[in-house]
Amino acid sequence: MKEQLQQKVKDMNAYLQIRSSDEPAAMLEKMELLEIMIAQAGEYLALSKSYQDEIIQQTILEHDVNDDLSASTLNMYIKASAKDWNFLVTSFDRINSAAVHQHDGLRTRISYIKTLMNG
């Protein structure tokens, strides 16, 4: 599952880095695809957080209170144990944000074009 989500991050980031067309029809199409991406990124974010929580729980259960680890050391160990999932959580959060901003930007550009055509 982790590898599939890592591939989704790569694919989504690649799509977000493509410059959009100045054609209104192409902009509308990209907006529709961004809407799908926003929904998918939200789903993948929740899934990644779930796996991240599992790793955190497993790591905590592996360490007994008598392990002589300070709270900060244990916290660092937990973060290191979940590093791949931490990356995915952060990535899907940023993808979601970028897709929302691109969608808003396209809507603004379409409104501007519409104003020029009517003016």
Image: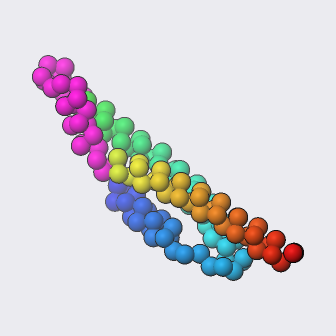
The count of marks equals: 0
Q: Does residue 102 show up?
A: yes
What residue is at 37 percent from the left and 37 percent from the top? Answer: 53
Judging depth in this view, the residue of 28 and 43 nearest the camera is 28
The part of the image, by quadrant, that contains residue 36 is: bottom right
Where residue 103 appears, as percent x and y from the top left, is 63, 62
Residue 84 colored magenta?
yes
In the image, residue 60 sits, relative to residue 96, either above or below, namely above
Predominant secondary structure, magenta span: helix
Which residue is farthest top? 66
Judging depth in this view, the residue of 80 and 62 nearest the camera is 80
Residue 118 colored magenta?
no
What residue is at 31 percent from the left and 32 percent from the top? Answer: 57
The part of the image, by quadrant, that contains residue 82 is: top left
Where residue 115 appears, as percent x and y from the top left, is 82, 71
Q: Does residue 4 show up?
A: no
What residue is at 75 percent from the left and 70 percent from the top? Answer: 112
Where residue 63 appears, as percent x and y from the top left, is 19, 28
Q: Which residues are magenta?
A: 61-85
In the image, residue 89 sits, relative to residue 79, either above or below, namely below
Q: How is the image coloured?
A: rainbow
Where residue 44 appears, as percent x and y from the top left, is 47, 52
